[in-house]
Image: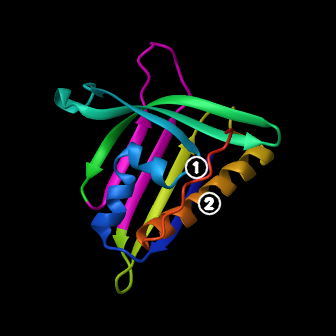
Amino acid sequence: MEIERQLLVPAPAAEVYALVDHLPAYLGWMGLVHEVEELEPDSTGPEGVSRPAWDVELRARVGPLARSKRLRMVRTVHEPVRSAVFERRELDGRSHAPWVLTALVEPATGSQVELTMRLSYGGSLWTGAVLQRVLDDEIRAGSENLLALVSGTPQEPRRSGR
């Protein structure tokens, strides 16, 4: 499954990038992100370069039930003020479905930037029409929260499963 969304954001690129290049920042605008805990940096990068890592809990409500998933995410690409890529990198030696989150900030018109977010998921827990709709709703709400945050009228993101 792959979800991609573009959003015109009336804010400087550095301000928008600061909201998408560090996973704890997602708690301020993306309700799907339920909890984020910083971990020891990941040292599996090229030439042993250490990269930030987080334990992330995603949670979404489907009717009376909540689905949640814990992921160890590592920022594998960090191009300041332009792009960040986070990939699932578990350390338990087992095979896991891939999760890749890409954020790209590009100049748009006037004082706006275009934010493109892409989530690629290769597993089966979050698939199907109902869960696709839930993810779409969460992403739409997150987009609205992000716009409110940069406009100076932040709202507490609604967290699923609470």
**Tag 1–tag 2 contact (CB < 8 Å):** yes
Circle on res. 47: none
Q: Nearer the viewer, residue 47 or 34?
A: 34
- The residue range painted magenta reads 81-105
Q: Nearer the viewer, residue 28 or 47?
A: 28
Circle on res. 31: 1
Coloring basis for residues: rainbow
What's the distance in space between the residues labelled 1 and 2, CA to CA?
A: 8 Å
- For label 2, the crowd category at 10 Å Cα-Cα, with few meaning under 14, some 14 to 19 and many 20 or more, is some
Q: Where is mark 2, residue-wise? A: 141
Q: Nearer the viewer, residue 155 or 36?
A: 155
Residue 89 falls inside the magenta stretch: yes
The image shows residue 49 at horizontal and vertical percentages of 19, 31
Residue 141, relative to residue 112: is it above or below? above
Q: Residue at x 70, y 34 (%)?
A: 67
Q: Nearer the viewer, residue 9 or 151?
A: 151
Residue 121 falls inside the magenta stretch: no
Whichever of callouts 1 and 2 sits on the residue coming sooner in the sequence is: 1
Residue type (three-letter) at the residue carrying disc 2: Ala
- Most extreme residue toward the top is 93
Looking at the rendered structure, the secondary structure element under dot 2 is helix
